[in-house]
Image (spheres, rainbow, N blue to C red):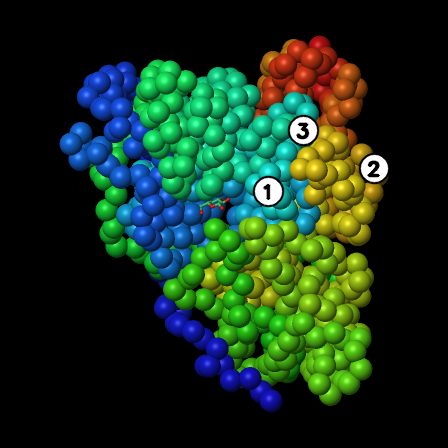
Amino acid sequence: MPFSRRSFLQQSMFTAAALAHQNAVAKSSSIGSVNSQSIEARVDALLQRMTPEEKIQMLHGARRRGFIGYIPGIARLGIPELALTDGPAGVRHGTGTAFPAPVALAATWDRSLAQEYGAALGAETKAKGQNILLGPMVNIVRVPEGGRNFETFGEDPYLTAQMAAAEIRGIQSQGVLAEVKHYAANNQEKQRQIVSADVDERTLREIYLPAFEAAVKDANVGSVMAAYNKVNGVFASENVHLLKDILKGEWGFEGFVVSDWGATHSTIVAANNGLDIEMPGDAFFGDKLLAAIKDGKVSQSIIDDKVRRILRIMMRFGFFERPPKPGPIDYRAQAQVARRVAAAGVVLLKNQDNLLPLDLNRLRSIAVIGPYADRATTGGGGSARMSPLVSVSPLGALADAVGTRTVLRFLKFVPGNDLSKSDPATTGAGLLADAMQIAKECDLALVFARDFETEGDDRAGISLPDEQDEMISGVVKANPRTVVVLNTGCMVLVNRWAEAVPAILQAWYPGQDDGRVITDVLLGNTNPSGKLPISFPHTRADIGIATAEQYPGVEGRGAYSEGIFIGYRHFDKENIAPAFPFGHGLSYTTFDYSNLKLSRSRIKPGESLSVEVQIKNIGRREGAEVVQLYIQDVQASLPRPVKELKGFEKVTLRPGQAKVLRIDLDSRSMSFYDPAQKRWIIEPGQFKVLVGSSSRDIRLTGEFEVV
Ligand code: BGC
């Protein structure tokens, strides 16, 4: 039966041709722009006037209905309240814009989009009368099953650091504090409240900490959330090495540390070891903390330091002048940012014989098959879940786009049926037969598949759930002209059908505009330019992290025995071909790489150099390419990855247009963390520069020497 186009459109507010895009990115960040001496003097004066009880009041949450985290103000002293809200895929205080999942933002590889995404989040936070946003989440994808992988920026520390710093700048440009989370090594949901990430110092520094370091040093993040888990046997919320030695010591972090919700486990130890605020209640940092001060177990100067950190940041951000106050939200402008990010994050994994984009003039009928094609994939579950005001499903958007030109035949493939069971009339086997029949009768089949990632629960496996593999295999058997769209929060196994399916799109959780974003790519209104921030394996075993000791851990301890070799670092080391490599993503046009030039061929340790490369669009459409730069340390005294991402640039080119891109390499790009010397070092020797379109599609190489 032909599908009626009207019934699936849930709203039409975005159909107006051009909505003015609000440039939400403020010109300068409010942090750092105020005279710090006068701020410290103001803090001193306030501290002198505060009673011990007033100080303690600032160091823990006071539960308030409708608020995720709340610290009341102190009217007598003019101290405003702090209102904390989730984060990181939208502003969770009430309904609001469902932005694409952070993993989709990472797939854009576009710093300026990350900044806009942050600015839009910041603007909505402010308009909802909140002043701290609990994001971004910068934990690294270590375990493929990880229930919160959709909230991350993927498997690479450099990409994560770059996107996180840009997003934080955006959030904070709105006078709202970002709270980067979860510090540190919070990489699984199984036993997340108790598991210890047993991780060596080098791995911590090279893989799990760089994004936090960038948040502090490059983006001046105002607050940091301490993770649920332990790190090397000590809870993150009372881990002196993480909080005092590294964060507040080495990195010079001047803001405050908040425990994840319910992640505080002690009063004296946590207070002395660097935690500043307990959330969401006062089990440890309320009366017990007051008593600990009276007993001399926690010194006054430690308390004052905590309060100072909070007040200082509140002043830097102008909270005293602008206490949180709800205001109007420009939801159209918000929706536009969400849609542009989602579009730029779609990754074209495969496009045999240029099946995509679809030419509607040549398609009389399209089968639309999938359990959720008629529902928007607005996001994952848990504290990042958003309830958008509006959403558009793929089916709705497709119907709108094809109009009466092409017939859409929709089959809702109800999940949960065991296809191997007999009675085909009442079980999924009957449905599969129907799906195959419809696919066969149509000119093309579009299959939508998804998974459900959520906080609190890791995925049971990394295959698509609910017989969707069988669904895809069956449909492509019935009609080889099949396009698969994946709405998943991380990688999934595609091996059972990827050979046979000519075109595959990875669309992640695109947020409220799911349908329109995907439709634009399918029809060629958007030329896909996303690149994978994670590797897709052929099999689960290919990823490593295969023993129970590594994941989920044994007796509460997870051994990070793979060290720095996760993601593509592991695939490269073991010489395993991924199904789709890190950095991979096709376009409807083609790019040519040429003229690699290094500014210098010999440098001294600590010196920088720059790399230039020319990119030309040699196809027939405008498109954007992400030029990736990897470094290989040819000989090193410690094992180093075959290659590591150290630079990237995204460039949009018209057909025939060429541009020379410059990527600067600083000394950190060549260094590794030497646990013996307890510092980053650069060893003299040869280095290779690998420039390409993915981690496995290196187009040009160069060399330099550190002497
Ligand atoms: C999550 C945090 C979140 C907090 C508040 C916790 O369960 O781990 O990411 O910000 O809840 O909702």
Image height check: is 47 above or below 630? Answer: above
Query: The N terminus is located in which quarter?
Result: bottom right
Q: Which secondary structure, mark 3?
A: loop
Q: Which residue is mark 2?
A: 574
Locate residue 605, reporting x and y percent: 64, 12
Q: Which residue does the image show at 62% across and 78% down from the upper left?
A: 412
Q: Nearer the viewer, residue 147 or 133?
A: 147
- Badge 2 or badge 3: first in the primary sequence: 3
Indicate left or right for 372 with 475 as reference.
left
- Left or right: residue 388 versus residue 241 is left
- Identify the element where label 1 is drawn: loop
Assess disc 1: are there few (<14), some (14-19) or many (≥20) residues with their C-alpha within 10 Å of its C-alpha: many
Residue 520 spot, x, y in % from top left: 54, 64
Rendering quarter of residue 28? top left
Per the rendering, the mark at residue 192 is: 1
Q: Position of residue 666 (x, y in %)?
A: 58, 22
For the question of whether residue 266 can be seen, the reply is: yes
Q: Which residue is mark 3?
A: 199
Instruction: Kindly indicate whether the residue at mark 2 contacts the one at mark 1 (C-beta within 8 angstroms).
Output: no
